[in-house]
Image (cartoon, rainbow, N blue to C red):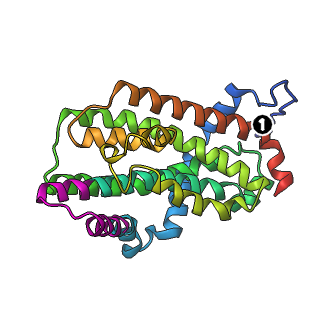
Amino acid sequence: MAEPSSSPTVHVYEPTDTGLPPLHRYLREIWGRRAFMWHLSRSELKAQHYDTVIGQAWIVLDPLLEAAVYYLLRTVVRPIGTDAERNALLAHLIMAVFFFGYTRASLMGGTKAILSNRNTVLNSSLPRLVFPLVAVIEAFLDFLPTFVVYMGLHVLLGQPITAALLWLPLILVLLTMFNLGLALLASTVTVFFRDASDILPYATRIWLYVSPVLFTVSEVPPNIAPYLKLNPMYWFLGSLELIFTGHGPTAKGLFMMTVFAVAVFGLGAFYFLRRERDLAVRL
């Protein structure tokens, strides 16, 4: 006679002084659901645009068209003389639009992470942090083809290929940590304040205009630079601008990227975990 199957383990999170769940157990549960997160992100991307050739092409064409509009705007307002200068500006615009788009997609995906998975949140016991993670995975998977296209354009536009590009993985890790912190904050705030999801698209547009996307760091007037340096994307895009032009990032740039990445991720994780048990009540 077959032995009865063992009942599933039930975890009870008792109140703590910090309001946080036991982190070791919580992280172990998230790691155990890595296959679920991967398949969920892939299925949601397929539902959005991966199931058609045009949809896949639009992942790259959309930011390329956006960069083309900004290029026309820049060259009309301030004509550029030499071909080398025009190529450098175009390469910068495409790079900045692609990388800023990764951050924007992570933030906007975070606004829907909990709300669009309402039924799963209400009827399952899995850690809710899984859903903002999936939003960032989706944004990263969308970013990868744009990065490959950019590297091809980087070469075609005659931009330098140097050892400075070896800094790119570190900057991507820091940017992804920063993006995850934004997604965690956005996913929590939009549950408690539903109007935030309507305001964020306008906020991200303003954020783009005050980031080194339409302009390079070297073009920033000295009297404005101290204010723009309060913007985390100033340091991320500024460092990317350096490595794609053949220079390594500055020590201050690396320090500031690390500070912003750790601070935003820590704040987002702390706020999300403290309010996680209230999410189902607010849905």
Taking depth in this image into account, of 269 and 33 the one nearest to the observer is 269
Left-right relation of 173 to 65: right
* Range of magenta residues: 66-91
Residue 89: x and y in percent read: 24, 56
Query: Local crowd at mark 1 within 10 Å, few (<14), some, or many (≥20)?
Result: some
The dominant secondary structure in magenta is: helix
Q: Amino acid at mark 1?
A: Arg
Which residue is disc 1 drawn over? Answer: 274
User: Would residue 124 be seen by someone viewing this image from the given angle?
Assistant: yes
- Asked which quadrant contains residue 1, the reply is top right
Taking depth in this image into account, of 200 and 58 the one nearest to the observer is 200
Left-right relation of 152 to 141: left
Please identify the quadrant where the C terminus is shown: bottom right
Q: Residue at x 22, y 64 (%)?
A: 79
Instruction: Classify 21 as above or below 123.
Output: above
Residue 222: x and y in percent read: 38, 40
Is residue 72 within the magenta segment?
A: yes
Is residue 138 within the magenta segment?
A: no
- Asked which quadrant contains residue 184, the reply is top right
Taking depth in this image into account, of 8 and 136 the one nearest to the observer is 136
Taking depth in this image into account, of 158 and 223 the one nearest to the observer is 223
